[in-house]
Amino acid sequence: MRSQRNTFQAREHYKTPEEELSETETSDLLDKEFKQNIIRTLTDMRRRMDEHSEHISKELEDIKKNQSEMKNTILEMRNSLEGLNSRVEEAEERISKLDERLEEITQAEQKREKRIRQNENSVRELWDNIKCANIRIIGVPEGEERDKGAENLFVEIIEENFPHLRKETDMQVQEAQRAPIKRSPKRPTPRHIIIKMSKIKDRERILKEQKKGHK
């Protein structure tokens, strides 16, 4: 029994040269296929890496390009801002000068208005004085003052109506003339003769005597 088992095992371990060659070839084939697979895998990986590297390089170039464009844009914006700041400063300077000029004009206008008011007051005072110093004589026919003179007519009227005034005071006439108002054909009343007295008190005395005469 033991002899049969050994014989079987011996048969099992014994192989022919053809069988051994076949195993060697098979191993070589397997090694070759494995190597080819490895090479293909490595080649594919290399290709993918190259493609990925190329893609990354392109992206980096795009990024660099975008960075360059952004730098140019930032530089342009900075230059624009500097230009705007310069124009703003110029505008502020002009506004400041305009404000100063406006202040000067305002002050000059205020001074001018003040002078106008002062002149108006002076004219008003002068006119009031003129009005206060004036005496109007009515009813003297037109042309009579040319023959005798307006001042002489006034003196005659005073001597005739208020003889004592002429003796008591030395009344002086500054100016005597007809009123410049034109005569109306519908109203042939002679124009008034306006007598401007040198002293207001003389006018007041004449008016006072006139009021006494009417009482």
Image: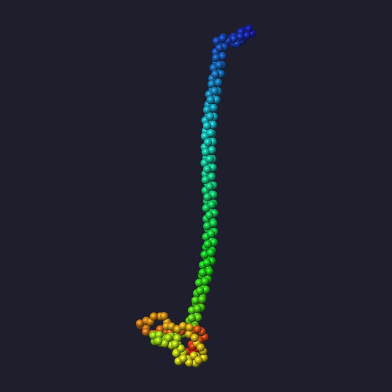
Camera-side residue: 16 or 207?
207
Q: Is residue 40 visible?
A: yes
Camera-side residue: 99 or 172?
172
For image coordinates 46% across by 83% down, the residue present is: 175
Residue 122 against residue 85 in the figure, above or below: below
Report x, y in % for residue 68.
Answer: 53, 40
Choose top left, top right, bottom left or bottom right for residue 35: top right
Report x, y in % for residue 16.
Answer: 56, 9
For the view shown, which residue lies furthest in the left direction? 185
For image coordinates 50% across by 84% down, the residue present is: 198
Residue 41 against residue 74 in the figure, above or below: above
Question: What colour scheme was applied to this rendering of the protein?
Answer: rainbow
Camera-side residue: 15 or 66?
66
Residue 6 against residue 56 in the figure, above or below: above
Q: Is residue 10 left or right of residue 157?
A: right
For image coordinates 43% across by 83% down, the residue present is: 177
Q: How many marks?
A: 0
For image coordinates 49% across by 88% down, the residue present is: 206
Residue 203 against residue 57 in the figure, above or below: below
Q: Is residue 208 left or right of residue 184?
A: right
Camera-side residue: 40 or 193?
193
Q: Is residue 134 visible?
A: no
For the view shown, which residue lies furthest in the right direction? 2
Report x, y in % for residue 101.
Answer: 53, 62
Q: Quadrant of the N terminus?
A: top right
Report x, y in % for residue 97.
Answer: 53, 59
